[in-house]
Amino acid sequence: CDIFTDVSGVYTADPNIVSSARLLKEVSYEEMLEMARVGAQVLHPRAVELARKHKLPLRVRNTFDPDHEGTILRGAGEMEIYRPVSGVTVDRDQARLAILKVPDKPGVAGEIFGALAERNISVDMIIQAFHQDRSVNDITFTIKRGDLNTARTALEEVAARVGAEGVLADEDVAKVSIIGASLMDQPDVAARMFRALGQEGVNIKMISSSEIRISCAVS
């Protein structure tokens, strides 16, 4: 199955931002799903999910250069090329929210995120930080910037109910992610990512990871 877009396939980064971005000959469904969810615009996640579900090879081609071979999506077990990192993405449509000194007791986290779910607000990176006496903690997470005002209002209501100290919001945030099916086999990749950001003077505010993705909220 071929999908035609305005680019020649899937690149290691957005070629409009990174001039040295390379075209990938192949990429796994899982890698492409993560890329799409954290900022890559070349394919909609739903298209990738359907291809993976039906084990259908999917080729991304350029509408204006239909003879170009583009990029093929396939299962990770069918990949011919081994690489620790397949792509880098950036998502500037981010905001960070923190609810401070939340009482450390059962049910509170459910109430916080339940209030967001009721408003159809998706949460991505989540960090829970304990205070020294361990009776309270701070819960920080990222959301889409357009959801910030609604989410902040909801959290202020929850904070008052559960006895939290308050809510902090930060719009000066972007999310940078690296994606690769073999990330967990390369223990130095995270260190190299953090070092590269530090060398460019980029401050890391939050970190989250999965089996094939490492994301940093930066400012």
Image (cartoon, rainbow, N blue to C red):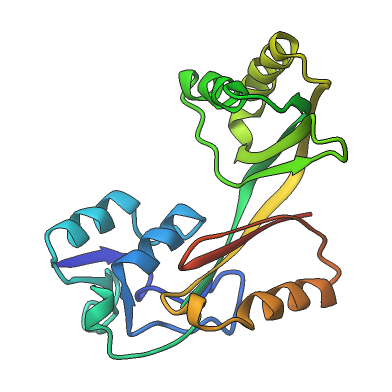
Q: Residue 189: where, in percent of width, then height? A: 61, 80
Q: How many marks?
A: 0
Q: Is residue 42 left or right of residue 65?
A: right
Q: As rendered, which of 59 and 204 lies closer to the eye?
A: 204
Q: Is residue 17 left or right of residue 2?
A: right
On the rendered image, what quadrant is the N terminus found in?
bottom left
Question: Which residue corresponds to the image point at 83% horizontal and 77% vertical from the top-left?
Answer: 199
As displayed, is residue 109 above or below residue 51? Answer: above
Tell me the quarter of the picture where residue 161 sits: top right
Q: Is residue 71 left or right of residue 101?
A: left
As displayed, is residue 42 above or below residue 135? Answer: below
Q: Is residue 194 visible?
A: yes
Tell me the quarter of the picture where residue 169 sits: top right
Q: Residue 11: where, in percent of width, then height? A: 45, 76
Q: As rendered, which of 35 and 101 lies closer to the eye?
A: 101
Q: As rendered, which of 85 and 105 lies closer to the eye?
A: 105
